[in-house]
Amino acid sequence: MPLDSCALALLDLPAELLIRILSYLSLIDLCAVQRTCRKIRIIVADSMYLQYILLAQISGVDDHLPSDFALPERIKRLRYHEQSWNNLQLNAFHNFPSDVDHSYSLQDDYLIYNLRKSAGTLQYGYVDLRSAEPNEKLRWVNIFIEHISVPVGFVTAVDHNLVVVLRTQFTDSGAIVELSFLEFTTGTPHPLSSRHNVRLPVNTILDVAYAAVDILGDYVVTTVMSGRDVCCLYLVSWKSGAVTLLREIELLHRLTPFWVPRLVVIDNSLIMLVNCKMTSLEICRLELASPDSEPRLKTVCLLEFPVLPFYALAVSKVRKEWIPTSECNPLSQLRRKRVVPFRSSKVGTIGLLLLDQKMTCAASVRERSRYWMTISVASLLASIPPDSNDVRAIPWGDWGPAATRIFKYPHRWGNILPKPAGPFWIIGFSPLVVRDYDPLRTRRAKAKSTEEVITSHSPSLSRPPVFSPTKELGHYWVAGEVETRLPFRDVAEKNLRPQQYIGIIADREWIIEISARGQGAGTNVVVYHVG
């Protein structure tokens, strides 16, 4: 059939059927199809359902409103949610003292702390912000775990009601690494785990130098570095206790812990390995077990960095927003006072702290400068080739400039900033400055207004979007200046200027400021609700 006939046949369909067909398109395709003809553009513009899909996908959220909410009410709430972030509309929710001065996290509206109380004892606690009333006196639920030996890793997954503790036990033959699977709300062995303590194979562990753990659905991805310069990547089922060695990486030079390979979970199957290839990021696909094969980590492609000498660049920190990996959250079924309407549906950006350094003849490292690289996950995924048996190396120029933004790491940030705030990044705290790197939201903000005019009475200042490229010069980068152009937009909250600030954490619903009360007096925690 000629193409003209196909187009006429499509446009002859009833509007209701066209709306149903268009609703299955991705965000990019739905935006593109509006430019094909006037009739489709009018249908999309007039359809409340398609406008809702566009707004939700541009915002990057999943809708968790009850099913009895009408579509106009959903759109109204979604627009208000976006406006709250665009204008940083913060409402003081709680202000309370705490004896904990570090190690806070935020998951599914639970404010969590963890610390090692004494040798062999692990303590953590939580507060359910969603079940609290404004200005209500908050009380920590404190959990003490005895006989935990030496904990070297602690990670929570509230959506699985799970705590994973990575710990070591020292014997005459070396260090043994174990994983313990506990229930988040009680600290007792997790009821869904058939083996509550799982020991990793001892033949590869001699002397633990570095260990980390991340949760991916029903599995735990673990990185363990042994004293013989071998890094082992394990996949452990926290339900069955099955252990699979995904990869054993022999390191040529382990001079600093910054060069230890690190795992970064991008989504349910893609994992980024950093520091495995010193000149690139290795993107892998996790293929889970089937009746005929064990789980394996398959390399998909290598995303090259700018041209670098050997060991000139290392990733020392990795940060990203927390995303639930459970389809059925057991804690969400508990009776909580409020419904959180919108959640981030996927990781939007990943932040890497890069060290620009040089190895001297004495086999020591002299660090010169630090840079922060923000990577757009959507742009990164667009650069990955379709499934193929061949592993391709993608040059920096084909993915890096458009998918990243690199800038010099300010010394004033210390180890505190930048911090993920859902899909956004907090890059300043006096005043509070939030940066949005999402290209669609940034372009949408530019389309609405080239530069918003904010009155002196407004608590926030929205700065114009930045699309122009920036250049950074590394001391040891062979390529010299590196240009990146991932667009971004900053919003500053003019009135939030905490004193003796020591930390900040945030997600789409909450911004939590942690400041010191005095030497040895603990901290003061101020909770703000967005919107």
Image: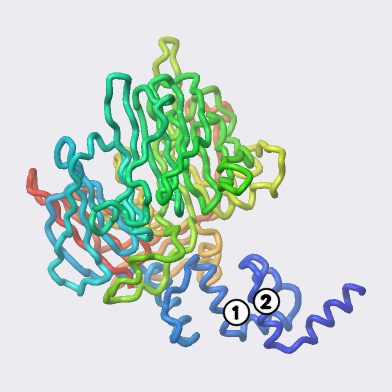
Q: Is residue 84 left or right of residue 28?
A: left
User: Image point 40% across, 77% down: which residue?
Assistant: 80
Asked if residue 368 shows in the view, the reply is: no
Q: Amino acid at mark 2?
A: Leu
For the N terminus, the image quarter is bottom right
Which circle marks residue 119 in the picture?
none
Q: How is the image coloured?
A: rainbow
In the depicted view, which residue is nearer to us: 483 or 192? Answer: 192
Question: Crowding at label 2, few (<14), some or many (≥20) Cα neighbours within 10 Å?
Answer: some
Rendered location of residue 329, percent (x, y): 39, 65
SS state under label 2: helix
For the C terminus, the image quarter is bottom left
Pick out the residue farthest to the right: 1
In the depicted view, which residue is nearer to us: 477 or 424? Answer: 424
Asked if residue 66 shows in the view, the reply is: yes
Mark toward the start of the polypeptide (1 vs 2)? 2
User: Image point 44% across, 76% down: which residue?
Assistant: 78
Which circle marks residue 22 in the picture?
2
> Mark 1 = which residue?
50
SS state under label 1: helix
Question: Crowding at label 1, few (<14), some or many (≥20) Cα neighbours within 10 Å?
Answer: some
Rendered location of residue 218, percent (x, y): 45, 53
In the depicted view, which residue is nearer to us: 114 or 420? Answer: 114
Residue 513 position by quadrant: bottom left
Residue 16, above or below 524: below
Q: How many marks?
A: 2
Residue 138 position by quadrant: bottom left
In the depicted view, which residue is nearer to us: 69 or 180? Answer: 180
Q: Is residue 107 left or right of residue 497?
A: right
Contact between marks 1 and 2 (CB within 8 A): the answer is yes
Q: Is residue 387 left or right of residue 93?
A: right
